[in-house]
Image (spheres, helix red, strand yellow):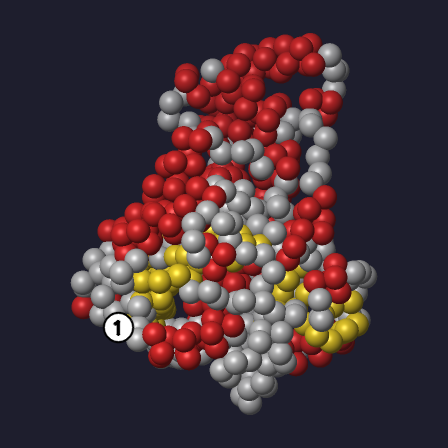
């Protein structure tokens, strides 16, 4: 049952937009990651077929306690996989419906005029997924960019220096890599490069994180010593990025409602060398902003559950468009979460982000919340040199950022930065520097070479 339960959990996280297949599998804590990855990938590949079989056989109506994600995994292995070699009581349940499911599969083949199971599959393959490079964030809590570059050179990779344009990233191939043109601690490798078994990854010296996913913590830019909330924290990549920016000085309060996700996140943060954090199994909406524990919270990163429609490196079967009803429900939750975040009394700066392409979850959420909180908070025109801006849904929406495979060679993403109103002169002189580059001095563009920080880090031996 452990394998099927783990696979179902990954499918649930995918539906919530919490990451891509590979990252969720490798962060799941399941001991046999290749076995789990294969089962999840194949279940996703057959997902449209499985949904038709479940509907036709009325399995979920007959077994009301069976979670739909687990049903998909069981039916895949029963009809297309290894025939349910494990599973305990769930295996027995699925086998009770085997005859009905097999009859439904036969009917489906007749309907589509095919004889092989594979012929039921839709042709796959979004070209966008193959364009997105492999981004590697250097974990500065444990090492530095120069040491990681030297390590990869010793492994036979050719370092081409700092990229000057997105086109240089697009042209990467073989064992060549670059320093990103925007983010100073992000290395860029050709698409499909896999480092999950690399010692730098397993020791926490590097974090495999898409460039767009690095933007929220980078733009929040809390100063070392700050108290920060990561409102919807799992799986924890953004939390570890915040800790690196804080240099483990200050405090991060990280919330998530799922016990297993928090346990996995705790393991990941410990591996990354994060120390100044508190995890809480709690819905962020139930957190009391007036609790004395949070009286010093000046920065909040809010990356709530979303449709995940921007996650182009997923398998094609993950890309089913959310219904209008689901989008309304998600947007309602996102508005509540953003309004709640803005109610923390000491809050000075907030980043709202999603991995969604839908205006309903992005510009519309920011616009609605600003109508209620616009007297206290303003939208910051952050990162002016970033090429992809928010949709012109309301005045000032272009201050937001969007990311996409076509324009930024990343996952699809949305980011908005909100700040508490201050004296206009003070605001105009101090905001751009922090928004452009957390590691820079005032007025430095994000494309400028970052200053090297002198600090000793442990080196990784091959």
For the C terminus, which image quadrant?
A: bottom right
130 over 156 or under it: above or below: above
Number of numbered discs present? 1
Question: Can residue 311 be seen from the camera position used here?
Answer: yes
- Please state if 394 lies on the left or on the right of 203 as rendered: left
Residue 268: x and y in percent read: 48, 62
Measured as percent of width and height from the top left, residue 458 is found at 57, 82
Counting from the top left corner in percent of width and height, residue 85 is at 58, 31
Q: Residue at x 54, y 24 (%)?
A: 51
The answer to which image quadrant residue 171 occupies is bottom right
Residue depicted at 44% across the width and 31% down the height: 324
- Residue at mark 1: 296
Q: Nearer the viewer, residue 225 or 389?
A: 389
Q: Is residue 258 above or below residue 254?
A: above
Q: Secondary structure at mark 1?
A: loop
Q: Is residue 208 visible?
A: no
Q: Residue at x 47, y 71 (%)?
A: 435
Using the rendered view, name the quadrant where residue 351 is placed.
bottom left
Q: Residue at x 34, y 47 (%)?
A: 368
Q: Is 375 on the left-hand or right-hand side of 197?
A: left
Q: Is residue 457 left or right of residue 291?
A: right
Work out which residue is located at the far bottom of the displayed protein and give it.
Answer: 454
Q: Where does residue 98 sit, x and y in percent of width and height?
A: 55, 16
**How many residues crowd around disc 1 within 10 Å: few (fewer than 14), some, or many (20 or more)?**
some
Seen in the picture, residue 448 relative to 242 is either above or below; the reply is below
Q: In the figure, is residue 331 to the left or right of 123?
A: left
């Amino acid at each position: 049952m452990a394998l099927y339960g783990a696979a179902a959990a990954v499918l649930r996280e995918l539906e919530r937009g919490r990451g891509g297949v590979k990252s969720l599998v490798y962060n799941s804590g399941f001991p046999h990651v290749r076995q789990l990855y294969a089962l999840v990938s194949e279940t996703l590949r057959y997902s449209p077929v499985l949904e038709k079989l479940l509907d036709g056989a009325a399995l979920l109506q007959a077994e009301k306690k069976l979670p739909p994600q687990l049903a998909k995994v069981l039916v895949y292995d029963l009809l297309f996989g290894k025939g349910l070699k494990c599973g305990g009581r769930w295996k027995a349940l699925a086998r009770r419906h085997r005859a009905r499911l097999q009859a439904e599969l036969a009917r489906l083949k007749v309907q589509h005029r095919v004889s092989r199971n594979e012929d039921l599959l839709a042709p796959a393959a979004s070209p966008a997924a193959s364009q997105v490079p492999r981004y590697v964030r250097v974990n500065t809590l444990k090492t530095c960019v120069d040491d990681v570059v030297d390590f990869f050179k010793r492994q036979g990779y050719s370092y081409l220096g700092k990229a000057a344009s997105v086109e240089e990233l697009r042209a990467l191939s073989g064992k060549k890599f670059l320093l990103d043109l925007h983010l100073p601690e992000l290395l860029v490798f050709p698409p499909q490069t896999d480092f999950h078994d690399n010692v730098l990854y397993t020791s926490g010296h590097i974090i495999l994180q898409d460039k767009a996913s690095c933007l929220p913590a980078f733009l929040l830019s809390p100063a070392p010593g700050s108290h920060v909330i990561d409102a919807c924290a799992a799986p924890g990549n953004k939390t570890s990025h915040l800790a690196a920016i804080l240099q483990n000085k200050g405090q991060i309060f990280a919330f998530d409602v799922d016990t297993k996700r928090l346990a996995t996140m705790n393991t990941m943060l410990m591996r990354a060398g994060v120390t100044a954090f508190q995890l809480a199994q709690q819905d962020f909406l139930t957190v009391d902003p007036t609790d004395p524990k949070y009286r010093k919270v000046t920065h909040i990163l809010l990356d709530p559950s979303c449709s995940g429609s921007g996650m182009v490196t997923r398998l094609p079967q993950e890309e089913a468009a959310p219904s209008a009803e689901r989008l309304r429900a998600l947007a309602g939750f996102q508005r509540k979460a953003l309004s709640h975040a803005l109610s923390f009394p000491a809050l000075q700066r907030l980043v709202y982000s999603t991995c969604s392409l839908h205006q309903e979850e992005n510009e519309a959420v920011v616009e609605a919340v600003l109508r209620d909180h616009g007297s206290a908070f303003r939208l910051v025109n952050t990162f002016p040199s970033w090429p992809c801006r928010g949709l012109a849904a309301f005045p000032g929406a272009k201050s937001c950022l969007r990311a996409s495979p076509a324009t930024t060679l990343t996952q699809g993403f949305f980011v908005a930065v909100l700040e508490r109103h201050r004296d206009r002169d003070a605001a105009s002189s101090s905001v751009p520097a922090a928004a452009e580059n957390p590691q820079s001095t005032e007025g430095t563009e994000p494309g400028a070479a970052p200053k090297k920080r002198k600090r000793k880090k442990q080196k990784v031996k091959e």
